[in-house]
């Protein structure tokens, strides 16, 4: 379990370093997550320690939304002033997410069917 936690913290730290020195416009944890995903794809799987830590974090995922909810209430006047832009961005991102998900599912199902044949 400690090994899994170290792996997550290592990739978050790497993401922070890349963000600080190369891509300051992207958040470090996002870069770290992408690096972790690339590493897992190259390893062709996830080890048990990392899976156990990820499952543990997933159980408390709802707590991560509390600061965001407090921020929404705190900045309500600014949100009202920019409501049209925010709604447009949300609708656009939902459409893009659905389209991307459909493309990935189609690709993976075609790949899965070709390996079964």
Image (spheres, rainbow, N blue to C red):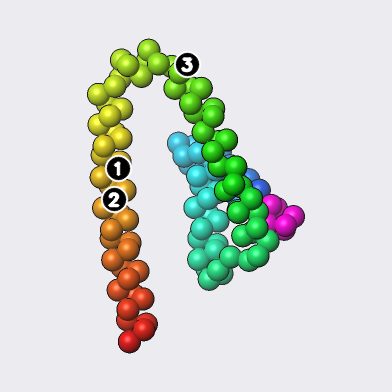
Which residue is more in the foreground, 64 or 36? Answer: 64
Give the CA distance from mark 1 to mark 2. 6 Å
In the displayed structure, 110 sits above or below 99; it is below
Q: For residue 22, say whether it is visible.
A: no
Where does the image place residue 62, in percent across and percent down from the top left? 54, 38
Q: Residues within 10 Å of mark 1 (few under 14, many from 20)?
A: few
Residue that mark 1 sits on: 94
Which quarter of the figure is the N terminus placed in? Answer: bottom right
Q: Which residues are magenta?
A: 1-7
Residue at 25 percent across and 24 percent down: it is 84
Residue that mark 3 sits on: 74
Residue that mark 2 sits on: 98
Asked whether the residues under the numbered discs 1 and 2 touch, taking CB atoms below 8 Å apart as contact, a structural biologist would say yes
Q: For numbered disc 3, what is the local secondary structure?
A: helix
Where does the image place residue 40, in percent across and percent down from the top left? 54, 63
Asked whether the residues under the numbered discs 3 and 2 touch, taking CB atoms below 8 Å apart as contact, a structural biologist would say no
Which residue is more in the foreground, 62 or 23? Answer: 62
Give the CA distance from mark 1 to mark 3. 25 Å
| Magenta stretch, overall SS | helix
């Amino acid at each position: 379990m400690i090994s899994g936690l170290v792996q997550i913290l290592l990739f978050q730290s790497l993401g922070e370093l890349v963000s600080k020195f190369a891509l300051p416009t992207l958040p470090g944890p996002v870069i770290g997550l992408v690096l972790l995903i690339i590493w897992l794809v190259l390893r062709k799987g996830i080890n048990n320690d990392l899976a156990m830590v990820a499952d543990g974090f997933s159980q408390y995922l709802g707590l991560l939304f509390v600061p965001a909810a407090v921020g929404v209430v705190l900045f309500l006047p600014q949100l009202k002033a920019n409501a049209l832009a925010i709604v447009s961005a949300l609708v656009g991102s939902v459409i893009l997410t659905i389209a991307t998900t459909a493309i990935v599912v189609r690709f993976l199902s075609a790949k899965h069917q070709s390996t079964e044949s």
